[in-house]
Amino acid sequence: MKRPIEISLVAVWVMALAFGQQPGEQQLSGSAEAGYRWTTNLAGSHYTYRSVVDLGEGPKLLDFDLAARPTGRSWWDRLLVSGGSWGGDPYNHARGELERFQSYRFLVDYRNLTYFNFLPSFANPQLAGGLESSQRTFDSDRRLVGIELELLPGKRVSPYLGYRRDAGRGYGITPFVENGNEYPFRTRLRDQTDEYRG
């Protein structure tokens, strides 16, 4: 079994921009955590490692967040950005929010999930551990994107428009049942749902 080793360099910054602001006033702040991961002891099953752990190698942006406010009069009052797990991990996400108080709020949300399962579902000494050793194998990605614009937030009447997409694709093994017998078949997975609301 592979053993992941992770070294994390924590880079934290807090910035105050001096565009005519008072001492101690903060316009831009945030933090980020970056690192690098690699695996050692490569003996064992690569498929089992991906099914149970599935942490990729290479540089990583583990976590980040940013908050900003304009220094003077502007068409926006606050910007928030956050996310994490970028760089080959099975789940990563990002979120952004732009707002002008009592006027509008604009949200963007992104999530990506990679699912891999190659654990054998039955034992057969005649098989060499290939695709046929499991009746339920999945190697798929699912992405969710959401966008929403809300007008007059916090008011009694607050109109909004929203859109969300949930899409998945990948490959797998699924059983075909006939007369009590089950036969594993390669399957292409693909689906998509679009939702509009307001």
Image (cartoon, rainbow, N blue to C red):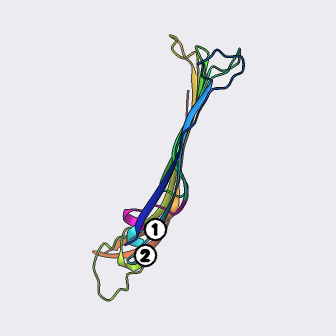
| Quadrant (top left, top right, bottom left, bottom right) of the C terminus | top right
Would residue 117 be seen by someone viewing this image from the given angle?
Answer: no
Count neighbours of disc 1 (C-alpha within 10 A) and say few if under 14, some if 14 to 19, many if 20 or more. some
The three-letter amino acid code for the residue at tag 1 is Thr
Q: Secondary structure at mark 1?
A: strand
106 drawn magenta: no
Residue name at image x 36 percent, y 63 percent: 52
* Residue 182 drawn at (x, y percent): 33, 75
Count neighbours of disc 2 (C-alpha within 10 A) and say few if under 14, some if 14 to 19, many if 20 or more. few
The three-letter amino acid code for the residue at tag 2 is Leu
Camera-nearest residue between 132 and 5: 5
Residue name at image x 52 percent, y 53 percent: 35
Which residue is under mark 1?
39
Residue 18: quarter of image:
top right
Residue 109 in the image: above or below residue 152: below
Residue name at image x 71 percent, y 16 percent: 20
* Residue 156 drawn at (x, y percent): 50, 10
**Count of numbered circles on the image:** 2
55 drawn magenta: yes
Which residue is under mark 2?
42
Circles 2 and 1: CB atoms closer than 8 Å: yes
Residue name at image x 62 percent, y 15 percent: 103
| Quadrant (top left, top right, bottom left, bottom right) of the N terminus | bottom left
* Residue 24 drawn at (x, y percent): 58, 19
Residue 117 in the image: above or below residue 108: below
Which range of residues does the magenta coloring cover? 50-58
